[in-house]
Image: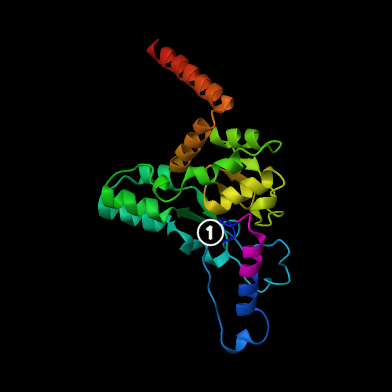
Amino acid sequence: MIRDEAGRKDIQNEYVRFLRGLFKGAEPMKYISLAYITGILPMIKFKTQSALNNFDEFTMLDAGQMAPYIGFSEEEVKALCQKYQMRFDEVQKWYDGYFLDDCHVYNPKAVVSAMTRKKVQNYWSQTASYKSVLPFISMNFDGLKTAIMEMYSGSEVEVNVGSFQNNISSFSGKDDVLTYLIHLGYLGYDQYHRTAFIPNEEIRQEFQTVLKEEKWDELHRMEKKTKVHECVIEKYKKK
C-alpha cells in the first residue's frame, strides 16, 4: 500500500487509520493478544509516530532474533546442495550476501529454483522487476550515482539508514534511496560498519540491466577499463 500508492495521501492516511483502529488503544487488546504482520517495507514513519509506535519491527536493517528465519541459512543451503547434488560454492556466489546479525541468509526463492531446475542462474527477475527501482536509482541526488557505481565494482559504501521515513514521495537524498533498496533486497547491509553493498551475482546482474537501460556512461567506461585490464592480464600470462 505504501509503495504502490505513494502519491495518494488520502489512501495512505486511510490505511494508517485502519491499522491504528486495529492495534492502538485498550479496546483492541480485549480481542488481540498478538498480531504478526509481514511485508517488504517497515511501518511508515512519516507523521505516524504516535499512531503506530506499538510495533516491534524486524527488518533487513536489524532482524534481531528473527534473522535465521528470514531466508535460508548457510547450513540449510549446504544440506540442500548435498541432497540435490549442486555445487555449494556456485550457489553461495549467486544467492548469498545478506548478513543479518551473525547469520548468512540466502534468497529462498532463488535457492529453491536452482535446486529444482538443477541450474544456477538469475531467478530474481521472475519475482521482482528492475523497472520498479529504476526511477529511484536515476534520482539526481548528490553522490547517488557514485555510490551505485562503487558498489557495482565490488566496494561498500557508507549509508545513514536512521533518517528513512518509508515515505517514497519525499525521498530527500541518496541515503533514503539506498535504505529503500536494502529493504527491497537489492542491497545488502552491514549493520556493524553501516555500509551497503551488492550482495551477490544474481543482484549484480539486476543492477547491470538497470544501468544499461539508463545508458550510464560510467558503466560503459568501467566495462571498457575492465576488458582492457583482462586483456593485459591474459597477454602477460601468455608470455
Q: Nearer the viewer, residue 177 or 214?
A: 214
Amino acid type at mark 1: Ile
Q: Residue 52 is drawn in which quadrant?
A: bottom right
Residue 221 shows in the view: yes
The total of numbered circles placed on residues is 1
Pinpoint residue 229: horizontal percent, then vertical percent: 49, 19
Is residue 155 positioned above or below 23 on the image? above
| Quarter of the image that includes the C terminus | top left
Q: Nearer the viewer, residue 74 or 219?
A: 219
Residue depicted at x 40% and y 57%: 75
Q: Main secondary structure of the magenta part?
A: helix
| 62 to the left or right of 143 | left
Regarding mark 1 in the picture, which secondary structure is present there? loop
Pinpoint residue 35: horizontal percent, then vertical percent: 54, 77
Residue depicted at x 40% and y 56%: 108
Is residue 230 positioned above or below 7 on the image? above
- Circle 1 packing at 10 Å, graded few (<14), some (14-19), many (20+), is few
Q: Nearer the viewer, residue 129 or 179?
A: 129
Q: How is the image coloured?
A: rainbow
Asked if residue 172 lies in the magenta stretch, the reply is no
| Quarter of the image that includes the N terminus | bottom right
Pinpoint residue 36: horizontal percent, then vertical percent: 53, 73
Q: Residue 2 is drawn in which quadrant?
A: bottom right
Location of mark 1 (residue): 40
Query: Which residue is farthest bottom?
Result: 30
Residue 194 shows in the view: no
Q: Which residues are the magenta region?
A: 6-15
Is residue 205 positioned above or below 62 on the image? above
Q: Residue 165 is drawn in which quadrant?
A: bottom right
